[in-house]
Image (tube, helix red, strand yellow):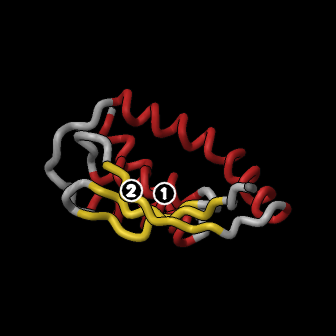
Amino acid sequence: MIGYLDLILRLAIWFLLTADVSLPNIIIGVCVALLLPRGYTAPTVLKDWLRVIGEIIVAIPQAYFEAFEIMFRPHNREDIAMERVKPQRTPGLIFLDIFLITFTPKTIVLKYHEDGWYEVHRVRRRKKR
């Protein structure tokens, strides 16, 4: 089951990059997804994938809300924070974590550190005094 989720993730990235869902591109995408090397990490738990998919569904309206909030209320405070990667994350789940953080307009991942940290840039509102 997890292998299918990895394949679907790779195909989704392929279709986002090519913006083409024609039959020849689907065939090429499947071939590329199958030929890409796989890392040998701890097996992913289906529960983690389902949680990330739920987080993606929640992030879509959150991204719209944050975009409108930035347009109508100034955000002039910035900071950079280090966030810990959740334990036993496969490269696919790490990619989705980075995607989720970067998807919302107020945050972006500047760097992924191999020792298990994300460097995250945030835009915030300055609090009134």
| SS of the residue under disc 1 | helix
User: What's the residue at 61%, 64% (across, down)?
Assistant: 123
Q: Is residue 31 left or right of residue 123?
A: left
Tell me the element at label 2: helix
Q: Position of residue 23 (x, y in %)?
A: 55, 62
Which residue is depicted at the point 51% across and 67% down?
Answer: 25
The quadrant of the rendering that contains the N terminus is: top left
Outermost residue toward the front? 129
User: Spatial distance from mark 1 to mark 2, Cα to Cα?
Assistant: 6 Å
Q: How many marks?
A: 2
Of the pair 98 and 5, the residue shown nearer to us: 98
User: Which residue type does callout 2 highlight?
Assistant: Phe
How far across and down, in percent of the image, does residue 50 sit?
45, 32
Q: Nearer the viewer, residue 7 or 112?
A: 112
Residue 109 at x, y percent in the picture? 45, 64
Amino acid type at image mark 1: Phe
For the point 27% across and 37% down, the residue is: 44
Which image quadrant for residue 129? Answer: bottom right
